[in-house]
Amino acid sequence: MRLSGRAVLLVMCVIGLMAVYATDQILPARTEYVAEMRVWLAARATGIVAYALLTVLVSLGMVLSHPINKSTWKLSRVLFPWHENLFVFVVAFIGVHIISLVIDPYAGVGLDGAFIPGLSSYRSLPVALGTMGLYALLVAGLTARYTRFLPSGWWLVLHRFSLVSWGLGWVHGILAGTDTELLRLFYVASGLLVLASASYRYWVAKQQRPTFASSLPEALEEAPRPVIAPSPLPGPVPATEWTIPAARPGA
């Protein structure tokens, strides 16, 4: 099932309400400082979840792009809906992440800094990398959904921006977060997962493992061809089969 743009807004609203409720339960606003930190906590939490989902999205996409999946199409049919709908949840969590940073007056990001690279007063370069990663993700996701508007062959080129988006998000999370030391193992594990998926995808392509599409012509060549006897040429029509038109009246 493909989720629509209306579903993205609905998921964003649900995630936003969950973030507000979770931060109130984890960090009740007993003081003014704690109340300010709750917005930052929601922004950081949604950013981490968005990055984790993006890691799964990219890894799953490289599994689906393996040439051997042409012969194991049942696996692709099971995984593809997850891959497609994960994009919706990644965008929704990123949307809540950005909104939390924009409404936080002490975050130093602001509306301009969130959407225009280099205008954030808080860690300008890491935030700019995150913004460019968002744009790369939108290019990869939207062009995949509307491939009919693209020239032939452009979809695959543009869809590879998803890997660029993940790389920018990885650097953004490490450099922009204040709790990177606590999440060091998380970033290392996610990086190894994507690296392993990419390496396996490259190995499969280099080994030129047989696929359904490549093995079918060979199977047809090796299969015995039926011998078709030529049909006999039509001979003269026997006289008994001749038809004589009836005589006209009065002739």
Image (cartoon, helix red, strand yellow):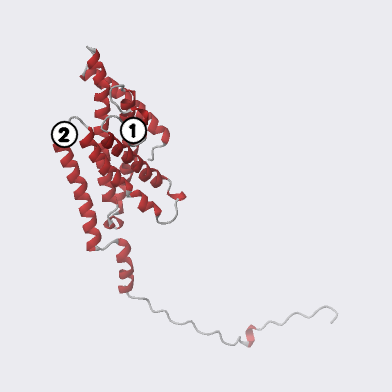
Q: Quadrant of the C terminus?
A: bottom right
Label 2, on which residue? 183
Q: Secondary structure at mark 1?
A: loop
Are there few (<14), some (14-19), or many (20+) residues within 10 Å of tag 1? some
Q: Quadrant of residue 139?
A: top left
Tell me how far mark 1 sits from mark 2, CA to CA. Answer: 27 Å
Label 1, on which residue? 119
Residue appearing at x 14%, y 33% in the figure = 181
Closer to the N terminus: mark 1 or mark 2? Answer: 1
- Check the image and name the residue furthest to the right: 250
Q: Is residue 200 visible?
A: yes
Q: Quadrant of the N terminus?
A: top left
Q: Position of residue 126 (x, y in %)?
A: 26, 36
Q: Secondary structure at mark 2?
A: loop
Residue appearing at x 19%, y 41% in the figure = 190
Are there few (<14), some (14-19), or many (20+) residues within 10 Å of tag 2? some
Tell me whether circle 1 and circle 2 mark residues in contact (CB < 8 Å).
no
Q: Position of residue 131 (x, y in %)?
A: 32, 37
Residue appearing at x 31%, y 57% in the figure = 70
Q: Quadrant of residue 224?
A: bottom left
Q: Quadrant of residue 243?
A: bottom right
